[in-house]
Amino acid sequence: MAIIYIMQRKSLLLFICLYSFVGHAQITGRITDSATHSVPFCNVLLIKSVDSAIVNGITSDSTGAFALKTAETGDFKLLSYSIGFQKQYSASFNLAIVGQAYSAGTIILKSDAHQLGAVKISADKPFMEQQIDRTIYNVGSSIIFAGNNALDVLRKLPSVSVDNNDNIKIIGKPGMLVMIDGKKTYMSASELAQYLKSLDASQLEKIEVITNPSSKYDAAGSAIINIVLKKDKNLGFNGHVFIGTNQGIYNSSAIGIGGNYRTKKWNFFAGTWGGFDIMSVYENLTKTFEPNLTTPQEVFAANSTTINHGHNEGGRAGIDFTPDDKQTLSFVAMGNVGLYTGTYINNTNIYHSGSILDSSLSTSGPRNGGFQYFSYDLNYDFKIDTNGKELSASIDYSPYSNTNNENDKSSYYTADGGYSRASTLLTASIPSSAGIWAGQVDYSNPLGKSNRIDIGFKSSFVTTDNNAEYWNVMNGVPIIDTTKTNHFIYHENIYAGYINYFRKIGKKLDLQLGLRGEESQIKGTQTIHDTTFLRAYFNLFPSAFFTYHVNDDNVLNLSYTRRIDRPDYGSLNPFIHFIDPYTYGIGNVNLLPQYTNNFELKYLYQQWFSTGLRYSYYTGVMVPAFSQNDSTHITYETMSNLGYFDEVDLSLATTIPISTWFTSITSVDGYYNKYGGATYGTSYVNTGYILIVSSNNSFDFNKGWGGQFSVIYNSRNISGMTVTYPFYQIDAGMRKTIADGRGTISLSCSDIFWSNKIKTTYNNNGINLQDLDYYDGRRIHLSLYWKIGQSQYQRENKKKAAAEEESRMQKAGK
């Protein structure tokens, strides 16, 4: 409905964009509460006096200020509204000529007693905010994310893809970097997914998607996803309790408590959480073997089900010390531990000539394991002077360990159901551990009012240890399988430095030039086979940003960056991962980094419309590749480097206040992708178009009721030699605030039609694969979030209200 409405208003949108470059009336003002405190992110609508038709809209900035423009003339009013306040209409005013300026002064909003009570006055941020270098999703206040974990939140974001093997990527961009609170995670893809599953969505404040990072950031990743955790900034004691449960095919639940006590110099914060989860994952894989025209076609049709029962506990604690208004010293410790038990079942039918059943096999068995992840961060920030000269330093240590134990029994059958051979039993113990040290220093030095230089240095040291041991059990006796057993130790040291130069040219043009250099030293050792590979390379990564402020509402930005994606140790580890007797995964020690050159032109109109055009060129792009043994019919999956990848992306995003209670945020991305190169001696070119449409619609009703409805559609797309077919997902939810706003009850349903099922095909070098992956994603979520304590701001308001009441009573007694 929202998409149709937006299309109907397309002419209005075009009209506003065109007229924003010419003379038009400007309406300015500031939103405050009755105590003269600023009301940030307040909705302000310009409406016609005669019929209340919406002419334009905007949200106030962090200081409560706003500036609206219109090319129309006539009589108008301003309508201001925000959660916790009553709607406020201004007096009617007249704009007689185009270009006339009008100051609305200070608009004072009155508290809404039904919504506010003893709760601090605040306004929800919009779900999506567009900035020049990033898109910000304020997931902390979204209804449809309540009761989800952090990985599920990423699944629901526009342009972010999480497949059913839990690999995260930005659609259309191979390779990316995930950060937590601005810190690189250094985990492999599977370890990162495991960690994100342990984080409840209530712990997240926002997620930033940075498609063209500057030289200040690590050069790794063609794009960056930064997950920002919540941290209360109010003085006094503040806390929260959350409890949630969700039901799909199976049930999951989570509970947690957190809080902080902040004074002017000290801030102590801590939180703990835990939960259990039962998740099922399903896969239908069809492999067709047709080595030559004289050999009959063989088809392997496999159906697998994985059901994992897991539970996890975690905690986060820290302290901030601010001795004066210039310095802050912080220490944060965080940890997560979890255990899981599960079962794996795989049934494969083998057909001759495409449809005649020849034989079958069944692989099944219990699987269990666990993980431990900890991080310790020490940070120091020093504002050297009032002109903006700053120094910051940090040192981080993150140990991680993971265990996986597998017992897979394979039984082989003839077409009529009898045994064709003796059953086999393969057991495995696959422990891994990692230790990561990282240190960074950043210095910012303004040179007058229009220039600034930023300089920084960073070093990171990563060591991982993966010991995969496999045994074939015969007559109850385990015998080591030397073809699969492997002990792999990986060292990665990176030394980096950067310099950024910023210059403001006049009132309209901003220039930023940057250069980052990174030295990579890598060593991988297979202890069992006594082999070692060494790599060392130095790369420069330039960046350039040009920002032109056409006027207060219109901004143009042109940028260029060069990036690198290094293989993670899981992709380099040459051990063989057993899936079923005919399917294996294997690492590639010869895998090299991929490099990207990104060019982007972006236009931003206020906070509610943006569009961009991006071109990216990749060399040595890393994509999944498959090989097969025609005699044994075993398929191997590995990561491989291709020649190149071209991508063109046209994006559009709008935030439209359709009414005072209905806001729609819609984004549309169109891609053209072209892959070219060779794998296993076969050259190929693969091209395709991608369309991604996302619409997130929020409803604010009376008496604390609210709702949300979102739709995401992904068209057919390509990644290397793999084609993914269209899929969509629809989520909806409602919330109700209770107890004067202290509590929030949320009820939502994710993937209502269970439509997020990923179908892919792969056809190259005589290999034909068809795969359908899906998981227990259709779930009903019920959660309660309860605020504890009061900030100093709230206590001061209560004291003021009490003083006013006492004064009124004294006057009444005279």
Image (cartoon, rainbow, N blue to C red):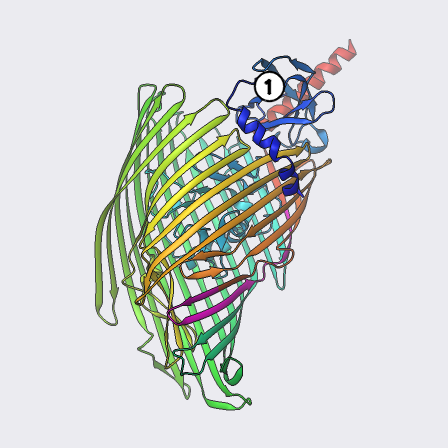
At label 1, which amino acid type do we have?
Thr
Label 1 neighbourhood size at 10 Å, few (<14), some (14-19), many (20+)? few
Q: Which residue is drawn at the image coordinates 22% and 62% (left, top)?
A: 533
Q: Nearer the viewer, residue 681 or 479?
A: 681
Label count reads 1
Magenta stretch, main secondary structure, is strand
Figure check: 617 above or below 358: above
Residue at disc 1, secondary structure: loop
Which quadrant of the figure has residue 224? top left
Figure check: 507 above or below 724: above
Residue identified by numbered label 1: 36
Q: Nearer the viewer, residue 643 or 741?
A: 643
Residue 764 can be seen in this image: yes
Q: Is residue 776 magenta?
A: yes
Give, as a single range, the part of the protein colored magenta.
Answer: 761-784
Q: Nearer the viewer, residue 720 or 502?
A: 720
Could you tell whether 602 is left or right of 730 in the image? left
Figure check: 258 above or below 574: above
Q: Which residue is drawn at the image coordinates 62% and 45% (left, top)?
A: 143
Q: Locate residue 220, reporting x and y percent.
A: 34, 47
Q: Locate residue 382, reporting x and y percent.
A: 34, 29
As drawn, the residue found furthest toward the front would be: 293
Residue 227 can be seen in this image: no
Point out the image quarter for the C terminus. top right
Q: Which residue is drawn at the image coordinates 72% and 32% (left, top)?
A: 114
Q: Locate residue 799, reporting x and y percent.
A: 63, 23
